[in-house]
Each structure stands twice: as C-alpha cells, then as structure tokens.
C-alpha cells in the first residue's frame, strides 16, 4: 500500500501547526482579570499594525499599503483625561545606489535575445528608514471624534481635540450602560454631519446605504439620518481579543461594536478604553468603488494592536 500521500499530509499538518512547538507563554488570567490589569503608565508601549479586511502583514504590502508596525510610547497618562505619546515606524527602504544599479541593469540587459549570456540582476539593498512623531490629547473625557494613526503627522503634532485611539470615558460609560453611543472617525462620516440641508448628492448617497443602519429609513431629515449613521451598537455579550502583553499571550475582555463606517473592538477597561482593533468599511471614506488595490486600502483598512509592553524596556 502506498503511504506517501498520507506521509505528506502529516508533514504539511505539522508545518501548518508550527510543529506544535509554540514557546510563547500563555497568561493564566481570565479575560476579565487581564483587561483590568492593563492600566497604562509612562514608558509603556503599544504596538499596532495596519490591516486590510482584518489581515495584516503581506496582504497590506501586496495591496500597496504601509505594512510596518507602529510603536507608540506613552510619555504622559492621566486616565480618562489626557495622554501624550511618541510614535515611530521603522521601514526598509531601498538605497538610492541600489535603485540606480537595478535601473542600469534593466537599461543594459532589459531586452536580450534568448541564449545570450546575461549576468544575474543585482540584489536590492535596503536600509532602515524611521518615521516618527509626537501627539497629545487633553480630550479623553468627552471627545466625540477619534484620529486614525495613519493620519498622524510626522514631527510634533501638538495637542489634538480627538481621543486618538481610545474612546472617551463618557462614550465608554454610555456604551457599557446602553450598548449605544456615537463615534466619528473624522473622515467621510464627519463630513455628513456638516451638511445643513438635504442636497441631491447627499440624498442619493443616503438612499444607497439606508438599509445598512438601524432606525427609521424613510421620512427623516438628513441630519437625523446622519446622526443615526454615527450610532455605534455594541453586542449584547462581552467579546475576547488575544495579544501579547510583555511577551505573554493574553486574552482580554472586550466590547465589540459597529456602525456602517467601522467595526470596533474596545478593551473593557474604563481607565484604558483602548481600541484594540478597528476595521473600516468603504463608507468611512465615502468610497463605494473598491475594486482596485487603493480602493481596498482606503475602503477596508484599519489596524490591530498586537502588543502592549507594560514593563520598561520590554
């Protein structure tokens, strides 16, 4: 009997499972205990990475997005009131000399006949490029708007009137007690609220998506409809999310909520209501045309927190 197919299937299974040898320690805290333990302090770090359709890494690269991790360091933290932070992204950029060498090679050997002796193409050479900046918020108590990390500017970003990547204390309390609150990403969703009258364009847009939001879909003013669009509805049960905390695989308790613009996974900690995962929908950019790579990045982008380092130097 030929056992080769079975042998290969076993080998493949072991490869997919990483040979069953994941050495990462696992927390013995319950999700509720783990969430409560994640209070922030000066020098703590948050590591997040961009995603498309909830997937990070190579797929972001393939679609033309910036896939590198962003490390955020807390430089000042007053729970529920204010935060100052610095951030950096280290990315690999091809050197100018490497680009010139490849272009010279293409110019010389780009069109050659079959059988001609052509040397190997030069290997690209990369160097680390660091983007960095700083930003603060004194509006963690009641800000109505978030600020996506991809919109943070390099250098000194000053003090924002948004709650950055946290939801405000007021909105957290409202979400816990009523399962509903209003959140804005400051993108297309916010521009809807600035419309004072029903225009043909707004009416047409709302008509195209009116089936996607809760509440009365007909006979309401544009402002009321726009307010309904910003309403975030939370699931009835607590959710869970797994990340590394000081190198330990930890599952925390979360609030899972969404509106037509985004899906939010929020740390269930009133002192640190960090948005652990955010998935955008095309409506957040006013973008219904997502059949191109750039459309996917804009329409289905977002981020996820992969690590929180509470110990200095972790």
Image (cartoon, helix red, strand yellow):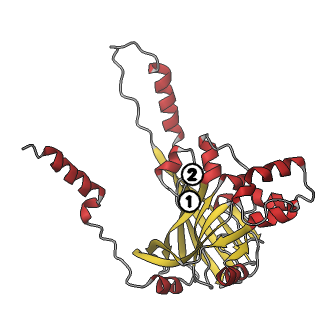
| Closer-to-camera residue (53/3) | 3
Estimate the x, y position of residue 271 in percent, counting from the top left: 62, 85
Q: Residues within 10 Å of mark 1 (few under 14, many from 20)?
A: some
Q: Residue at point 48% right, 31% down?
A: 102
Q: Position of residue 252 (x, y in %)?
A: 49, 78
| Tag 1 residue | 89
Residue 42's place in the image compared with 24, above or below, is below
- In this orientation, which residue lies closer to the viewer: 196 or 310? 196
Check residue 66 in the rendering and tell me which mark sits there, or answer none: 2
Residues at discs 1 and 2 in contact (Cβ within 8 Å): yes
**Snapshot quadrant of residue 175:** bottom right
Considering every residue shown, the one lying at the far left of the view is 1
* Screen quadrant of the N terminus: top left
Q: Earlier in the sequence, mark 1 or mark 2?
A: 2
Give the alpha-carbon distance from disc 1 to disc 2, as whole Å.
10 Å
Secondary element at tag 2: loop
Which quarter shows the C terminus? bottom left
In front: label 1 or label 2? 2
Query: Does 162 sit left or right of 66 as displayed?
Result: right
Report whether residue 192 is seen.
yes
Q: Is residue 89 above or below residue 29?
A: above
Q: Position of residue 112 (x, y in %)?
A: 42, 15
Q: Which of these two is toward me, 2 or 191?
A: 2
Relative to 230, is 81 above or below? below
Q: Can the viewer see residue 246 in this picture?
A: no
């Amino acid at each position: 009997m030929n056992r080769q197919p079975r042998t290969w299937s076993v080998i493949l299974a072991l490869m997919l499972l990483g040979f069953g040898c994941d050495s990462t320690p696992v927390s013995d805290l319950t999700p509720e205990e783990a969430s409560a333990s994640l209070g922030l302090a000066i020098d703590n770090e948050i590591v997040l990475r961009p995603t498309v359709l909830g997937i990070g890494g190579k797929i972001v690269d393939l679609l033309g997005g910036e896939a590198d991790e962003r490390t955020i360091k807390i430089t000042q933290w007053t729970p529920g009131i204010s935060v100052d932070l610095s951030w950096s992204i280290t990315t690999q950029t091809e050197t100018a000399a490497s680009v010139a060498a490849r272009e010279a090679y293409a110019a010389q050997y780009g069109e050659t006949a079959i059988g001609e002796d052509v040397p190997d193409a030069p290997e690209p050479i990369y160097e680390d490029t660091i983007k960095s900046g700083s930003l603060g918020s004194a509006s963690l108590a009641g800000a109505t708007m978030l600020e996506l990390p991809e919109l943070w500017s390099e250098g000194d970003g000053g003090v924002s009137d948004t709650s950055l990547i946290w939801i405000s204390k007021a909105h957290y309390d409202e979400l816990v007690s009523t399962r509903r609150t209003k959140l804005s990403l400051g993108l297309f969703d916010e521009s809807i609220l600035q419309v004072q009258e029903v225009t043909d364009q707004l009416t047409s847009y709302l008509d195209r998506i009116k089936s996607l939001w809760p509440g009365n879909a007909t006979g309401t003013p544009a402002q009321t409809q726009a307010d309904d669009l910003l309403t975030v509805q939370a699931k009835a049960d607590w959710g869970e999310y797994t990340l590394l905390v000081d190198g330990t695989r930890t599952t925390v308790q979360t609030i899972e909520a969404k509106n037509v613009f985004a899906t939010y996974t929020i740390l269930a900690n009133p002192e640190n209501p960090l948005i652990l995962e955010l998935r955008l929908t095309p409506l957040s950019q006013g973008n219904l045309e997502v059949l191109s790579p750039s459309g996917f990045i804009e329409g289905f982008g977002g981020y996820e927190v992969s690590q929180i380092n509470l110990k200095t130097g972790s």
